[in-house]
Amino acid sequence: MRVLRNYSLKKHNSFGIEVKADKFLSIQNLKDLRTILRKSYAAELFILGGGSNMLLTRDIHKTVLHIALKGKEIVAETDDEVTIEVQAGENWHELVLWTLEHNFGGLENLSLIPGNVGTAPIQNIGAYGVELKDTFVSCKAMNVQTLEEKEFSREECDFGYRNSIFKNQLKGQYIITSVKFRLSKKDHELHTEYGAIRSELEKQAIENPTIRDISNAVIAIRQSKLPDPNEIGNSGSFFKNPVIGGDHFKKLEEQFPEIPSYRISNEEIKVPAGWLIDQAGYKGYRRGDAGVHKNQALVLVNYGAATGEEILSLSREIQHSIKEKFQIDLEAEVNII
């Protein structure tokens, strides 16, 4: 393993923030991972995957481990379904495309989500009515202190909305090394009811969609709304869609009759954060190189040379504005480092 010092992380975070790491190592197998964990037992570590769900606001004065484990394999199969195990360093969207090539259904609605497989369970990534937990079987993770590898079941991961046990009780204690998914081989269950998928299929004159058609529709929708991180630095949705109580929503609906919503239960209603931010006047807003995307107010962007602190400052201003206007606390979806 080659240790790189004073290493720029600009290419390793989708916001394109220029910060440096004191030490940087790329981990490509479990043996190397155990070796560096053993040697770095007393050192502070920073675990880096695809760098797609974080905002770096400062240099990292730690040893950065870039998890680059690669590989995909079928570990179980029946006539109806297949279980695959995917290594943590695999790119998420490339995995989705691979499942489509094999006609494995279940991940198509999660097309074009940036990042790597290993960080997907931490966030319980989701889009267009589907979450990672819907196809998740288990994940293997290494304890950073004992070096033992444990397999976590779906129940043990305690998945929630953009949440898991790895963001809470076990934060910083494990490094996910691989993830297993159970996918359909035929009679795929299609999810077209959420967002603009149905209208996109109608626009393409598709009446009986395949899983690839669903994926293509999702890609088209995301590309029309979301900036490409390779062109404009961003981390996708910066804020979570807030969930509020029924009484609170009724009061807002009286004041804003056009407010969109998605009922979760009798007492819980989800409101699109993007709509709130748009109503507060921030859609397309720009301050220097930090801004809010012109097509999707939920996405904060780096137009070139913004610092992490500048983007963080803008996000806090938006949170304050939404609190004042709607009495809603917006919670960041990205990890602030």
Image: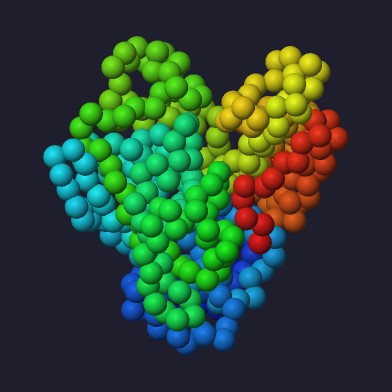
Q: Can residue 277 be seen in this view?
A: yes
Decide: is 296 above or below 162: above
Decide: is 37 above or below 287: below
Q: Quadrant of residue 116?
A: bottom left
Q: In the image, what residue occupies the spot 39% across and 77% down?
A: 148
Q: Is residue 172 left or right of residue 114?
A: right
Q: In this view, does 177 lie to the left or right of 337?
A: left
Q: In the image, what residue occupies the spot 33% across and 72% down?
A: 29
Q: In the image, what residue occupies the spot 62% across and 27% down?
A: 266
Residue 332, given in percent of the width and then of the height, sits at 67, 47
Quarter of the figure that contains the N terminus: bottom left
Q: Quadrant of residue 102?
A: top left
Residue 337, given in percent of the width and then of the height, sits at 66, 61
Decide: is 226 above or below 70: above
Residue sitting farthest toward the front: 266
Residue sitting farthest toward the left: 79
Q: Is residue 112 visible?
A: no
Q: In the image, what residue occupies the spot 58% across and 30% down?
A: 265
Tally the marks.
Answer: 0
The image's colouring method is rainbow
Residue 248, given in percent of the width and then of the height, sits at 76, 28
Q: Is residue 186 left or right of residue 39?
A: left
Q: In front here: 277 or 162?
A: 162
Residue 180, given in percent of the width and then of the height, sits at 32, 54
